[in-house]
Amino acid sequence: MAWKTSLQDLARPIDQNVHVDGRVKKLQSILVKAYKDGPASPRSWDSFGDLVALKVVFPTLAGAEIFTKELKEAAQSNGISCALDPRRSAPEKLEYSSDQFDLCNPKICDAAGNGLKVEVQVRTVASDAWYMVDHRLRYKNATKLPADLQRRVLRLIVLTELFDAEVDSLIKDVNAYESDTPAGLFNQVKELFTDFTRSYTAPSRPEGLFETLLSAYNKDDQLALVDILRELITKDGVHLRQVMSEHTYGAENYVEKYDWLYTQPEALLVADLARKPRLLASTVENTDFEQLVNSMADELKVN
């Protein structure tokens, strides 16, 4: 559970849809592996690296690659023993590909007080689906499949590789298409807001509010909007988090009618424009959001 929590905390800022799961190897499985070569030469306890095994499964290959890099850096900076095995198949072979870590955190111990080695596999949803099918039909099947059936299982790897590659290519093309549209800019601000608040933002958004607030910025500032908001967070992030925490779900005085906008990405634009109250007031004047936005600005601005 300690490892699962740590991996989730590292993975979710990369992709909120990441799935982290794990298992502890059962005693019977340990005994089978320990005496695989006969009772005269059992494996030593230290030779087991997968007594605890976890998997971190991302929707996209890009997410998995970013996580692999960040996990390696996090392990090295926190004194965690880390060995990375980037498993890749040769061009002429059909083999499973993944990034596999062997990690040992001295603070997470076994019953004897020794740091417990864990195995962490990083893969995509598509490759995870193939992995489960392969384990069921080949790896853990008591029946040894004939060559033609084994080949059919392995051929599925091609589909997973094509799927992951096409998804990454599609995402890049969609981002390129959206880059010059308000919708694309909103998605970037939404991602920044999600990272800042560590919260989930509903896919629907208030009609026209983002575009209204965006009109307060000139063309150059619109192009640099994400960088402007990053600077705002760096400078005033502590204050913004405090105010937002007082207006979020579960807060003592939370009233959805008045506080819902604090949970939306547009809150960052309101906080930025609060430093120019006259500009903000004129931007939202005579709109459905006028009273709500002006009230937020009074609380979000730093005196």
Image: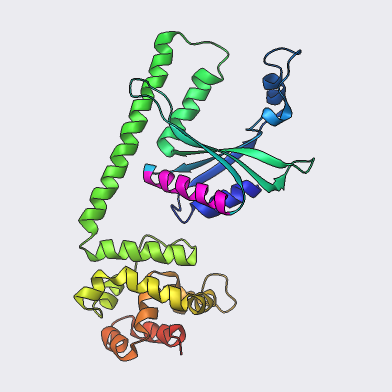
> x%, y% of residue 156?
37, 24
> x%, y% of residue 117?
65, 38
Name above or below for residue 199 compared with residue 8: below
Q: What residue sits 24% from the left and 69% below the top?
A: 223
Q: What residue sits 42% from the left and 20% below the top?
A: 153
> x%, y% of residue 10?
52, 53
Question: Can you name the residue that lies furthest to the right here?
Answer: 112
Question: Can you name the residue that lies furthest to the top here?
Answer: 146
Q: Is residue 53 magenta?
A: no
**Magenta residues (range):** 62-77
- Out of 95 and 288, give the one closest to the viewer: 95
What is the tally of numbered marks visible in this picture? 0
Q: Is residue 75 magenta?
A: yes
Give the left or right position of residue 229, taking residue 40 as reference. Answer: left
> x%, y% of residue 274?
37, 85
Can residue 266 be seen here? no
- Out of 61 and 92, give the one closest to the viewer: 92
Which scheme is used to colour this image of the protein?
Answer: rainbow
- Out of 83 and 144, give the one closest to the viewer: 83
Give the left or right position of residue 25, taking residue 21 as reference. Answer: right
Q: Main secondary structure of the magenta part?
A: helix
Can residue 187 be seen here? yes
Q: What residue sits 67% from the left and 31% below the top?
A: 25
Image-quadrant location for residue 35? top right
